Amino acid sequence: MSTKIRRWVETDTGHRVPNHKSKCRHMHGHRYRWEAEIEGDIVAEKGVSEEGMLIDFSDVSKILSEHIHDIVDHSFVVYSGDEDALKALAQMGDSHRTVIVDFIPTAENLAKWAFEQVAPHINTSYSNQLRLVAMHVRETPKSWASWTPEDYSSSNA
């Protein structure tokens, strides 16, 4: 039997979807919520700090802060093929934080990117088989995207 937990961080991050048919093709920003969903067995080892938990929530927060928040908060995420945005951002010089990615920064693609940033860091010295099962990205209060690796999706169908 396994248990799941979720922990999130929020960022203020800009992006644009260059080929979008509507207003998302313009440079704009969101208050993103980056939510990690982690699965595993509850630590049963007596006397350890994590007894009764999968992983300490503060440890998850540290991972999310270091590998998501500190990278994209108050940054503009731009697709490496978006020459117009790259040119505009270059004019700002070092006064602007730009994160260049090799994909169009939609919520769907950002969820996969976040998964790839976080997954290698979800581990513990205990044998409770922790794994990141999904990253959920809220772009607006009404709009979420999630990414789950295929091996998890098919094994839990």
Image (cartoon, rainbow, N blue to C red):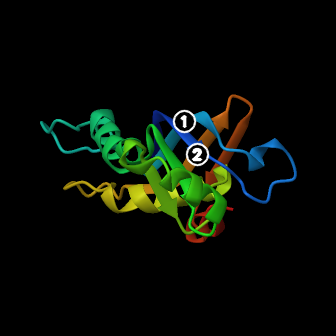
Residue 41 in view in this figure: no
Mark 1 touching mark 2, by CB under 8 A?
A: yes
Q: Check disc 2 and give the amino acid type.
A: His
User: In this figure, which residue is indicated by the disc labeled 2?
Assistant: 136
Which residue is rendered at x = 35% and y = 51% of the image? 67
Residue 116, image x, y percentages: 46, 62
Is label 1 or label 2 in front? 1
Residue 128 in view in this figure: yes
Residue 137, image x, y percentages: 59, 44
In the image, farthest residue toward the left: 47
Q: Badge 2, how many Cα within 10 Å: few under 14, some, many 20+?
A: many
Residue 156 left/right relative to 67: right
Residue 17 or residue 8, whichever sits in front: 17
Residue 42 left/right relative to 102: left
Q: Residue 20, labelled with which disc?
A: none
Q: Residue 33, labelled with which disc?
A: 1
Residue 47 against residue 15 in the figure, above or below = above
Residue 112 or residue 124, whichever sits in front: 112
Residue 152 against residue 63 in the figure, above or below = below
Residue 128, image x, y percentages: 31, 54
Which residue is rendered at x = 48% and y = 38% of the image? 6
Tell me the quarter of the picture where residue 147 sits.
bottom right
Which residue is rendered at x = 56% and y = 36% of the image? 32
Q: Check disc 1 and give the amino acid type.
A: Arg
Residues at marks 1 and 2, CA–CA distance in whole angstroms: 8 Å
Residue 77, image x, y percentages: 53, 52
Indicate the secondary structure of the residue bearing disc 2: strand
Which residue is rendered at x = 29% and y = 40% of the image? 62
Indicate the secondary structure of the residue bearing disc 1: strand
Residue 79 or residue 127, whichever sits in front: 79
